Amino acid sequence: MERYIGKMLDNRYEILEVIGTGGMAVVFKAKCHRLNRLVAIKMLKKDLSEDAEFRRRFHDESQAVAMLSHPNIMAVYDVSRGGDMDYIVMELIDGITLKQYMERRGKLNWPEALHFITQIMKGLGHAHSRGIVHRDIKPQNIMVLRDGTVKVTDFGIACLTNGPGNTSEAIGSVHYISPEQAKGEHTDNRSDIYSAGVVLYEMLTSRLPFEGDSPMAVAIQHFNAVPLSPREIAPDIPEALKQICVKAMAPDRSRRYNTAEEMLSDLEAFRKDPSVSFDYSVEDLRGSGGEDEPTQPMLNAGAARKNQVRYTPVEEDDMDDYDERPRSNWWKVLILIVLIGGTGYFGVTRLYESIMASFTITEALEYPVPSVVGFTVEDAEKLEGVSGIFEIVETDTREYDSTVPEGAIIRQDPDAESMKKKTASGSLIPITVVVSRGARSGAMPNLVGEEGRSAQLRLDQNKDLKALGLKIEMGESGYDDEVPAGSVIRTDPAAGTQLKEGDTVTLYLSLGPELSVMVPCLGQSRAWVEEQMAILQVTPEFTEVEGSAAAGTVLSQSVEANTEIPHGSTVTFTVSDGNKELQRTVTFTVPEGDGKQRVEIYLGTALSYGEDHPAGYVIEHTIAARPGDYQLRIFVDGILRRDETLTFADE
């Protein structure tokens, strides 16, 4: 990856240095020359970038994450693919991971943990509302900025770690994995809530809820063991905060918070009144599986990703049908574990599969047609109830559909839940499906720097985009020293993003440079002027000229007082060098005396005049000096005749 340093990606991003390396990607610091800002670029490692399917999912999922916009989620600016490179352009964050923060601080005090978990849940709530589940929440994927802001990172990458073929990817996250992930079941937003509960537990106690000699041992504890109550480890934790942690970590999803918003509501209630009680107990951690729940092989955390859906509560009427489903052969597995407990978990699993394969099972020849709408053909073929019974047959033509993602099935024939029989030959039953081409789309043009009305007309008149029926909105993005007022400073979505039918495009317009009001500076010192210009956010420049005023005194300014001036402007000041001398004329009449008398005039200790004159002679002597007060003394034949202060100043 070092070979990319100094290279330019897409004629836009200049790679500067490597700032991080992980199992899947390398992160570079780069400069975006189009917007003149520093960014972080996450680039897939070579072995993964050679997998076409992985690259496709990487690109598709990253595009989805790029649509997220929340202060507690690391911003994704761009997703690109070029040659053998796939990369994501993200905001460059000045901070450390929550894991590093906890390693430095140890056990966090509960107000600090409350501050962090609230921000984490706000970020997750936003992602869940957009149908995106993180599935790898852990302190290593949470950044803490210098100002205490928290940002959740690695959304798209976390999704990919759960894909087929990555059986070891869950190992690094096994301490935070939800029970359903550990069992290989489908996951939804409540899986993120469980992991966030583990993060809260670790912040409050400085310990993980489960430890073990191997990743498998830890994973099994998530659905078979009960951790110590946080208050047993740290008694200073408020009871209500412990209750929130307990409910978030309930192994039975029905006992967890259903949404991030529900958990945030309790966190806010606790913040307002730490003495509140929610009546959640450690018993919630025991789940409801008991002995009726079968021991299952430990699958990869994302093996069932094809079933991931946003959680929808089950209606009571649906539960009757649920109870009629065939029971699993849990007793067979239990017998195997008792007989061969010493062989280890994986040995039991392999033996179970071998014995079950030898059983002769008589099944009806008539099968219910499963619903495959919303799945890709590849995922549909792997669904339970499809494999080995049905065959997915795609029609020759795909259709545009703004409500169904590209590659997903729009409709099927025969309909779901209808009954179909196998032929006498036992061949697979065909399900004919129509696959979506996705919404009609077009790339978002780069409108940054264009005048707002001109940018809007450009969108309206673009043939490819006009057919999409875009909704165009205008917003203000704040002051900018570079972009003139009324011109586009950024767009949402960003340039290059694929737009779909009915999308909303927001053009954010600059307010132009921020203005300050110039203060009067004449007669002020240079130091005073520098201090005032820093407050006004303008740059002072000074030119010295010969002057009688004190050195550094302002004689003129290029911008008049009370005039508006943009931030970043330059103001020129003329200041005195203090070297100009002033003149004063001293008049003195020689007093009565014999003959000529010696008259001497001193300015300070310096002799300025010395001559002999008769009585009555009037002396007019001009003296030059720099501004200031001086002692003037006049002696006649050595006798002091005048002693006074002589001031030299501009009139």
Image (cartoon, rainbow, N blue to C red):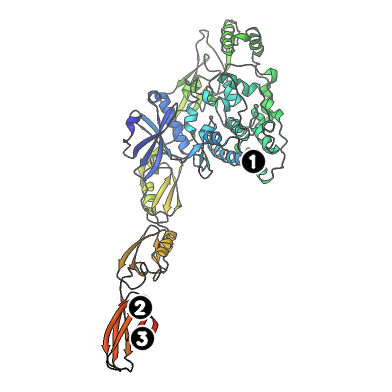
Q: What residue is shown with label 3?
A: 639
Amino acid at pointer 3: Ile
Q: Quadrant of residue 531?
A: bottom left
Disc 3, SS: strand
Tag nearer the camera, 2 or 1: 2
Query: Within 10 angstroms of label 3, few (less than 14), some, or many (20 or more) residues?
Result: few
Vertical arrangement, residue 32 with respect to residue 454, above or below: above
Q: Are marks 3 and 1 in contact (CB under 8 Å)?
A: no
* Residue 139 in view in this figure: yes
The span from disc 2 to disc 1 (Cα, nearest Å) is: 71 Å
Q: In terms of sequence position, does the residue under pointer 3 or pointer 2 come before the other?
A: 3
The span from disc 3 to disc 1 (Cα, nearest Å) is: 94 Å
Q: Position of residue 651 (x, y in %)?
A: 36, 80
> Who is closer to the viewer here, 521 or 37?
521
- Residue drawn at x 65%, y 44% as measured from the top left: 271
- Residue drawn at x 34%, y 67% as measured from the top left: 575
Q: What residue is shown with label 1?
A: 267
Amino acid at pointer 1: Leu
Disc 2, SS: loop
Q: Position of residue 59 (x, y in %)?
A: 42, 31
Tag nearer the camera, 3 or 1: 3
Rendered image: mark on residue 650: 2
Disc 1, SS: helix
Q: In terms of sequence position, does the residue under pointer 3 or pointer 1 come before the other?
A: 1
Q: Quadrant of residue 440?
A: top left
